[in-house]
């Protein structure tokens, strides 16, 4: 019985996302709440990504939770996420499907053979893990009263003076663009 308890203690906590209103970094405009939570600490990354540590490879993961409390659906397919630093320079989010190509593995090592050098096994790119794409923000439409969440990945370090800039969300029925969101990550 104690062996089972020891194995259970080593198992990481399951990845869970709270409501948008429960996060420190959030903003509400026109009954839409967007919350952001940087996943820079090792313990948070372990829960979300397992053995993969995106920050070790120059990627800053940012969890984004969107709550739609309006009476209509919101289109998210044209949504644009950017990080603005203290110098007001912006960096756009890197699509999750491209993250695996950001850290090139290089050539396989050559192993001496009887006829000449033979290529050895290539190492797998650490960013080519299901957690990177599987936990990415993928919602294209957000119905009334619903929420969506996922990670956006930025090729920059998130500093205390960084700000998340969100634009491009539209009301599905009218096509009217929603207000611009500017969420400080302090």
Image (cartoon, rainbow, N blue to C red):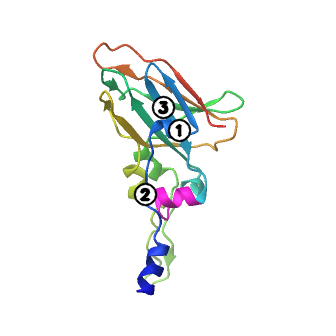
Q: Which residue is mark 2?
A: 128
Q: CA distance from mark 1 to mark 2?
A: 24 Å
User: Residue 183's x, y, as percent?
Assistant: 58, 30
Residue for point 43% across, 45% down: 96
Badge 3: residue crowd in 10 Å (few <14, some 14–19, many ≥20): many
Q: Secondary structure at mark 2?
A: loop
Which segment is the magenta one?
43-53
* CB contact under 8 Å: marks 3 and 1: yes
Could you tell whether 135 is left or right of 185 in the image? left
Q: Secondary structure at mark 1?
A: strand
Badge 2: residue crowd in 10 Å (few <14, some 14–19, many ≥20): some
User: Residue 78's x, y, as percent?
Assistant: 39, 26
Q: Which residue is mark 3?
A: 34
One can see residue 120 in this view: no
One can see residue 132 in this view: yes
User: Residue 142's x, y, as percent?
Assistant: 32, 30
> In which quadrant is the N terminus drawn?
bottom left
Q: CA distance from mark 2 to mark 3?
A: 28 Å
> Total label count?
3
* CB contact under 8 Å: marks 1 and 2: no
Residue for point 37% across, 36% down: 147
User: Residue 80's x, y, as percent?
Assistant: 46, 28
Dominant secondary structure of the residues highlighted in magenta in the image: helix
* Depth order, front residue of 56/8: 8
Q: Earlier in the sequence, mark 1 or mark 2?
A: 1
* Depth order, front residue of 97/43: 43
Q: Secondary structure at mark 3?
A: strand
Q: Quadrant of residue 174?
A: top left
């Amino acid at each position: 019985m104690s062996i089972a308890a020891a194995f259970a203690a080593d198992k990481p906590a399951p990845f869970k996302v709270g409501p948008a209103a429960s996060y420190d970094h959030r903003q509400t405009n026109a009954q839409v709440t967007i919350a952001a939570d940087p996943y820079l600490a090792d313990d948070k990354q372990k829960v979300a990504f397992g053995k993969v540590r995106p920050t070790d490879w120059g990627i800053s993961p940012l969890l984004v939770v969107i709550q739609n409390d309006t009476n209509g659906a919101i289109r998210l397919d044209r949504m644009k996420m950017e990080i603005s630093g203290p110098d007001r320079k912006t960096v756009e989010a890197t699509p999750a499907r491209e993250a695996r190509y950001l850290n090139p593995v290089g050539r396989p090592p050559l192993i001496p053979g009887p006829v000449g050098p033979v290529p050895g096994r290539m190492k797998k790119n650490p960013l080519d893990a299901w957690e990177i794409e599987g936990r990415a923000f993928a919602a294209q439409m957000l119905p009334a009263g619903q929420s969506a969440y996922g990670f956006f990945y930025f090729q920059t370090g998130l500093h205390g003076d960084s700000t998340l800039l969100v634009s491009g969300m539209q009301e599905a029925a009218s096509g009217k663009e929603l207000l611009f969101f500017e969420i400080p990550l302090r």
